[in-house]
Image: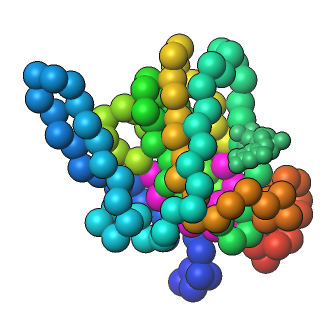
Amino acid sequence: MVDDREFSLSKCKLVRYQSFVDPRGNLGVVEEGAHLPFSPKRFYFIRDVPPEVERGWHAHKRLHQFIFALAGSVELGLDDGRETAEIQLRDDFEGFYMCPMIWRVLRNFSPGAVVGVLASDVYDESDYIRSYEAFREFAGT
Ligand code: TYD
């Protein structure tokens, strides 16, 4: 069946961003247009996550995000209501563009992992869908 929804896992993608690596250290660049199909309005990060803790367990109605491991690694469990995927992110200058309406779980944070998120809008709790049943209903799947 053709999936013609505006947002689905097929619209998400891994994106390699720019890196400048030299003996002085590594510099990474994530830029609108070149790497992001949206204008970021917010940056937040997650760190010091204890082993076994899983975060996320929600979807966003309208928010676009770019998730990347600034240090260490993390696993993303993804679900658009029809398909699921597992993606491992590590601090190798590759991040994940996540369109709206993707249910996500972040798990298996490595010790010392720091996960950065660029978001297309400011924080708005009303944009969250925090129940999986409500997500499926909203997604029409
Ligand atoms: P949440 O997005 O639920 O975190 P996670 O999905 O990683 O488990 O956010 C955790 C708490 O932080 C929640 O009370 C909302 C608050 N928060 C803000 O106030 N502003 C923000 O930009 C973010 C991302 C979270």
**Point 43% across, 71% down: residue:** 37
The answer to whether residue 92 is above or below residue 51 is: below
The percent coordinates of residue 60 (x first, y second) are: 72, 62
Model colouring: rainbow
**Point 44% across, 24% down: residue:** 72
**Tally of marks:** 0
**Point 42% across, 60% down: residue:** 13
**Point 59% across, 74% down: residue:** 7
Residue 88 seen in this snapshot = no
Residue 124, quarter of picture = bottom right
59 with respect to 45 (left or right): right
The percent coordinates of residue 95 (x first, y second) are: 41, 47
Is 53 covered by the magenta stretch?
A: no
Which quarter is ligand 1 in? top right
Residue range highlighted in magenta: 96-104
Which residue sits furthest left? Answer: 23
Residue 122 seen in this snapshot = yes
The answer to whether residue 91 is above or below residue 97 is: above
25 with respect to 66 (left or right): left
The answer to whether residue 130 is above or below residue 109 is: below
56 with respect to 93 (left or right): right
Is 100 covered by the magenta stretch?
A: yes
